[in-house]
Image (tube, coloured by chain):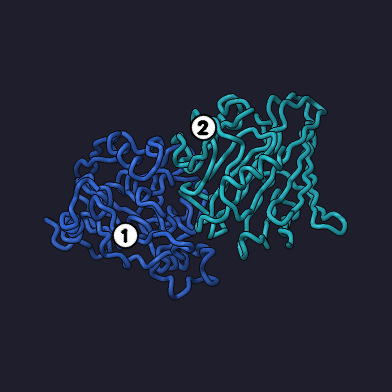
Amino acid sequence: MRGFTRRQWLLTAGAGAAAWTAGPAGVGAVEDDGMVRIPAGPFAMGTTAGEAARLARAYGHHVSWLSGEVPQRTVDLAAYRIDRYPVTNRGFLAFCKGVGYGARPNWHGAEPPEALLDHPVVFVNKADAEAYAQWAGKRLPTEAQWEKAARGATRRLFPWGDEFDPDACQWDAGGDVGQLGTAPVTAHPRGASPYGVMDLSGNAAEWCADGPGPGSAFLKGGCWMTTQPINLRPAARNMSGFANNASAFYGFRCVKEAG
Amino acid sequence: MRRIRFEPAQGQMAGSLTQIPAFPGERFGLGFPEAIGDAARTCWFGSLTPHWEQQADSDVWKCTGRKEGELAYTIVITPYEDMVDARFTLTNESRRTWSHSLAFNCFQCGAAASVRDHECTRHWVRTGGAFKRLIEVPRVFGPRPAIQLYSVEGAPLGRDIAFVAGFKATPDVVLEPWMAIQSRDGKRLAATVSMPCLFLFQNMEYSCIHSAAGFGRLGPGETGKAVNEVYFVEASLGDWYRRMKADLG
């Protein structure tokens, strides 16, 4: 991809991890509440027409399949904080117990199976995600906030760099059966974004506060069922769906004012 | 060879298919129909309470549905070894003339792990005399990006059908009236085709495909007929295509 050698790519991938362990002035540092501070400033959101054409050729798509993310535009955001990891079953359970909210369909009765506690909560629609966020004193990210947390100001294709790394996220790498479901949100440390935000590509696609039309909302990052790296890019939008739907591959994380 | 098992959801516009020789252990859903009637004012899933009745000493089921003063319909579903034949009648009981009428038939593959394809990389269609993967066909980024509708040969363009135009997601492309999903192992196909067909639809959220049956223009009191075949075959795309064309004459 983009002419990177393997060595260059390794360095690119490593840059993400370095940024959150030693970020300047608190940027990318994980705070006590498990959130990461994203600095104010502009970033390049979406995809250029030229890059869309290149990706479409590389992955055998008609270029119109990338039309939703074109053109690339500069978006200037105020500082904010975002959850380092997606909301887990453990976190959603605390919410359910706190307010009497309903269990998820993949739980065993009122609680998730022990093995899924640290997996992203799924079977949540946008309203479920918003209810949790309100309880937690947070809100859902806008698509721009989500994408900036994933790509930083680098225009990188994936959170960890420009080249796809099959071990950096929970995705369906192929075969006759494929992945069997979600993974713990900490399972792919190589997937760190430039700010150290984790698990943005794959695992559970994540609801955003805004959407392309009435009743629909952006769902970002692809999921454990995604088979094509092109659909694991933070800029991708095609999975965005009907906000009332909850599925086995929809989850979320939250944001908060920078304070 | 044993037949596919169809099990209706009594009182609902839906049923499920199991015991499919080509897809052992898998379950598929039929939202037959997910919507029906006047293409400008369809009756959606849940707005009718149809009655399903098994026909004597057979695997055949008959469904009757009605909305007073609007429409009445019947479906006869006959399972075979590798396909399910659904024959529809639709009667316009309103005082309006329907310019276009339809049965928006959902073939739900999302519960079948060996088939489901939420990215459309194994979805196949045919246009201009060539098979195409759906990702090779133009799409429109609409207000619900996970869905897409397609005009089909022999039917009005999607933009001229109220039901289709309302979704604002119809690319300028005309397909043959079927859509198929190849299994992950590449050896099997699940496919839907209707005759006459009004348009095609797919939803990446559910990995469902629709070949919407069209009944044409129906005046008050008039009845139209249509057929929707659902296939489960262990065959190449080309072999299935030739068989399907022969089946539909």
Q: In the displayed structure, would residue B142 be above or below residue A195?
A: above
Q: Which chain is cyan?
A: B
Determine if residue B43 is in view. no
Pointer 1 local density, CA inside 10 Å: few below 14, some 14–19, many at least 20: some
Instruction: Name the residue carrying label 1.
Output: A166
Chain shaded blue: A
Front disc: 1 or 2: 1
Residue at 54% in and 40% down: B125
Mark 2 Cα within 10 Å, few/some/many (few <14, many 20+)? many
Residue B238 spot, x, y in % from top left: 57, 45
In the rendered image, the quadrant that contains the C terminus of chain B is top right
The answer to which of A126 and B182 lies nearer the viewer is: B182
Q: Residue at x 36, y 45 (%)?
A: A59
Q: Position of residue A16 (x, y in %)?
A: 20, 57
Residue B222 in percent (x, y) is at 81, 28
The Cα–Cα distance between marks 1 and 2, rounded to whole angstroms, is 34 Å
